[in-house]
Image: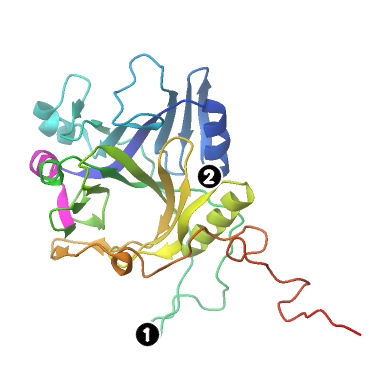
């Protein structure tokens, strides 16, 4: 069986107008609009459905307020869908141990050929006679992963591994499980984290962009648009990914991410004790101001060059 990643997510929200403005600023394309629902797409056709929480038939919520209601996983073909059909209802759905509705479908995402920046290390020169790009904003490629607070991390991990073939990448023992949906793939498509309260809630949804430069460009644009940073930019040591987290009007947090580790069957899961240095190699609290390009609430330079100084006579 081949699960290819997230094909679609559905939010239930209370303010469609604000969510429309946010996701357009985020870089998604508006594909459909109705009085009670918006549908956005990433570059590869991954869909983000934003429905009013009073919409009939919307899957139940894990928590009060705006939040994620459903995650749809894409499979390679109908044969793969048929293999997991015994675990699903007639609509291809089931509910995980945390109360989240999940669905499976033959993927609707498109194959893409996207140019990204090369990187020059001491051993490998991937960019010759070419500057690195600087982005004015981000255009997300796909929904890269979702993260939930869960009531029972062990039960949730067993559910995804035993029924659908997810693979453990790393763990916080007894606290968290990083899972990828296929043996060969990015570090995690799903992260399950159990808090002391053992409650169910959305933590964040991550959107994959081309490279670290688009993480910065996207984050600076969102900052200029007036949306609030939760944390970032920064880099995660566990997955190696660069991140920038923002507060999302559709629920919890939302992330730009890039450059996560790629794993194979040879990878051996590791165990980590949670802590600041495990979560982030480095991170900027409160984000960067999109105009000054400095940490928020820190005065930026005056004049055209950072070496300009005010002179007195």
Q: Which mark is residue 26?
A: 2
- 149 horizontally vs 144: left or right: left
- Mark 1 sits on what residue? 123
| C-alpha distance separating marks 1 and 2 | 35 Å
Residue 308: mark: none
Indicate whether 74 appears above or below 33. below
User: What x and y, as percent, mark residue 88?
Assistant: 15, 26
Query: Does residue 23 appear to the left or right of 198 in the view shown?
Result: right
- Rendering coords of residue 264 (x, y %): 18, 61
Examine the rendered structure and indicate whether residue 238 appears above or below residue 137.
below
Q: Is residue 210 visible?
A: no
The residue lying toward the viewer, choosing from 21 and 42, is 21
Q: Is residue 276 left or right of residue 220?
A: left
Give the residue furthest to the top: 56
Could you tell me which secondary element the residue under label 1 belongs to? loop
Q: Relative to residue 304, is residue 126 drawn left or right?
A: left
User: Which one is earlier in the sequence, the residue at label 1 or at label 2?
Assistant: 2
Please give the name of the residue rendered at 30% of the width and 36% of the height, measured from the top-left corner: 107
Q: Residue 129: x percent and y percent?
A: 56, 78
| Residue 162 belongs to magenta span | yes
Question: In the rendered image, which quarter contains the N terminus?
Answer: top left
What is the magenta range? 158-170
The residue under the point 54% across, 48% down is 228
Could you tell me if residue 74 is visible in this image?
yes
Contact between labelled residues 2 and 1, with CB atoms less than 8 Å apart: no
Q: Secondary structure at mark 2?
A: helix
Q: Residue furthest front?
A: 197
Who is closer to the viewer here, 107 or 56? 56
Mark 1 crowd level (few <14, some 14–19, many ≥20, 10 Å Cα): few
**Does the magenta portion include 23?**
no
């Amino acid at each position: 069986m081949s699960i290819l990643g997230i094909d679609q997510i559905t939010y239930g929200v209370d303010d469609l107008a604000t969510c429309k403005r946010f996701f357009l600023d985020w870089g998604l394309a508006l594909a459909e609009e109705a009085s009670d629902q918006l549908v956005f797409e990433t570059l590869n056709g991954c869909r983000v459905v934003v429905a009013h929480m009073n919409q009939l038939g919307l899957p139940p919520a894990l928590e009060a307020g705006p939040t994620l209601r459903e995650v749809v996983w894409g499979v390679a073909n109908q044969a793969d869908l048929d293999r997991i059909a015994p675990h699903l209802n007639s609509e291809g759905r089931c509910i995980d141990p945390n109360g989240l509705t999940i669905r499976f479908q033959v993927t609707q995402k498109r194959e893409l050929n996207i140019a990204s920046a090369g990187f020059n290390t001491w051993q490998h020169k991937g960019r010759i006679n070419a500057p690195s790009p600087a982005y004015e904003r981000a255009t997300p490629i796909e929904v890269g992963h979702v993260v939930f607070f869960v009531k029972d991390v062990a039960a949730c991990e067993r559910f995804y591994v035993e029924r659908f073939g997810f693979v453990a990448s790393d763990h916080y023992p007894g606290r968290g499980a990083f899972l990828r949906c296929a043996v060969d793939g990015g570090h995690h498509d799903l992260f399950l984290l159990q808090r002391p309260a053992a409650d169910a809630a959305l933590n964040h949804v991550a959107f994959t962009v081309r490279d670290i430069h688009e993480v910065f460009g996207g984050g600076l644009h969102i900052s200029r648009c007036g949306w609030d940073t939760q944390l970032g930019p920064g880099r995660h040591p566990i997955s190696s990914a660069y991140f920038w987290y923002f507060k999302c009007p559709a629920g919890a947090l939302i992330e730009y991410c890039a450059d996560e580790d790629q794993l194979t069957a040879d990878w051996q899961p590791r165990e980590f004790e949670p802590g600041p240095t495990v979560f982030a190699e480095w991170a900027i609290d409160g984000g960067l101001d999109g105009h000054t390009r400095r940490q928020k609430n820190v005065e930026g330079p005056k004049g055209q060059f950072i070496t300009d100084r005010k002179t007195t006579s």
